[in-house]
Image (cartoon, coloured by chain):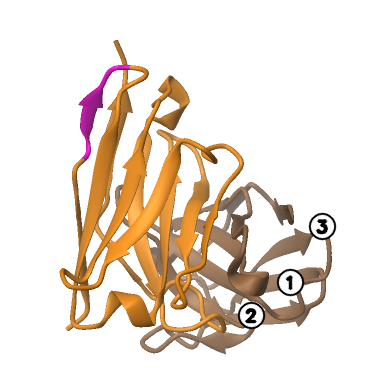
Chain colours: A brown, B orange
């Protein structure tokens, strides 16, 4: 299975900060990567798919980039509502879907 | 409106069986990629099973031979049959759907809690 490594595991930042989360795949996954936001006690919410495509209704301060094995999620101006845990997920061939370990963002 | 509603969780003894259901509305289960993702208390997300629109299924090594994903097209419902349950299967189980293999899971259920304990 493809392993996904996320960093950092915890991030503390202030309102208005630019925040970047990194995700690395153990082998090339082209652009088959999604980013999710999960708030405590809730189901995940899709933010970005195909590495850089913003899901409908997601604020434009969220953006994704990368291909192959290195990917990033950027929040351009952190807002109080962005306090959550963020996960990357690879879905190459839609087999053995794997998530990163998560990044908890504290504000 | 797209909705997914899970049910079937509960407290079960080790070695027991449960069947989780995920009732869908607003779309056709058989035309989408459907997943079961679990989250142990205080831990991250783990995808345990996937069923493709063509019926192909995949199960993670941690559940292979014990869990089976399936769907009932007439009921527009996704299932997860879980046998020989272990303490480490204790988790919130979510179903999710992706409209194609180019997408992540864009809709999720609220989750159903499975607790395996004697």
The x, y position of residue A90, in whole percent, is: 64, 66
Which secondary structure is most common in the magenta stretch?
A: strand
The quadrant of the image that shows the C terminus of chain B is top left
Q: Is residue B115 left or right of residue A97?
A: left
- Looking at the rendering, the stretch of residues picked out in magenta corresponds to B9-13
Q: Is residue B89 above or below residue A31?
A: above
Label 3: few (<14), some or many (≥20) within 10 Å?
few
Residue B58's disc is: none
- The N terminus of chain B - image quarter: bottom left
Tags 2 and 1 touching, CB below 8 Å? yes
Q: Is residue B11 magenta?
A: yes
Label 1 sits on residue: A71
Identify which residue is drawn at 37% across, 32% down.
Answer: B83
N-terminal-most mark, 1 or 3: 3
Viewer-proximal residue among B50 and A101: B50
**Is disc 1 placed on a helix, strand or loop?**
strand
**Which chain is mark 2 on?**
A
Q: Is residue B93 above or below residue B30?
A: above
Q: Nearer the viewer, residue A14 or B3?
A: B3
Q: Chain of mark 3?
A: A
Residue B99 lies in the magenta stretch: no
* Residue receiving disc 2: A64
C-alpha gap between disc 1 and disc 3: 12 Å
Of residue B64 and residue A43, the one placed in the foreground of this image is B64
Which numbered mark, 1 or 3, is in the foreground of this view?
A: 3
Instruction: Name the residue beneath numbered marker 3.
Output: A26
Occupied quadrant, residue B113: top left
């Amino acid at each position: 299975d493809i392993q996904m490594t996320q960093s950092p595991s915890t991030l503390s930042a202030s309102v208005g900060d630019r925040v970047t989360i990194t995700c690395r795949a153990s082998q090339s996954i082209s652009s088959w990567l999604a980013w999710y936001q999960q708030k405590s006690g809730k189901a995940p919410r899709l933010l970005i798919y195909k590495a850089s495509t913003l899901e409908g209704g997601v604020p434009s301060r969220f953006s994704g980039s990368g291909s192959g094995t290195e990917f990033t999620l950027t929040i351009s101006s952190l807002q109080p509502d962005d306090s959550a845990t963020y996960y990357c997920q690879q879905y190459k061939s839609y087999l053995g879907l794997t998530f990163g370990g998560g990044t908890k963002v504290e504000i | 409106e797209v909705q997914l509603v899970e049910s079937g969780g509960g407290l079960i003894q080790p070695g027991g069986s449960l069947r989780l259901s995920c009732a869908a509305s607003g779309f056709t289960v058989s035309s989408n990629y459907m997943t079961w993702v679990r989250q142990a208390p205080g831990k991250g997300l783990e995808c345990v099973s996937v069923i493709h629109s063509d019926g192909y299924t995949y199960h993670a090594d941690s559940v292979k031979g014990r869990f089976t994903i399936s769907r009932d097209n007439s009921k527009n419902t996704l299932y997860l049959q879980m046998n020989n349950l272990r303490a480490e299967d204790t988790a919130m189980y979510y179903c999710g759907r992706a409209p194609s293999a180019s997408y992540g899971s864009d809709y999720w259920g609220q989750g159903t809690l499975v607790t395996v304990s004697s």
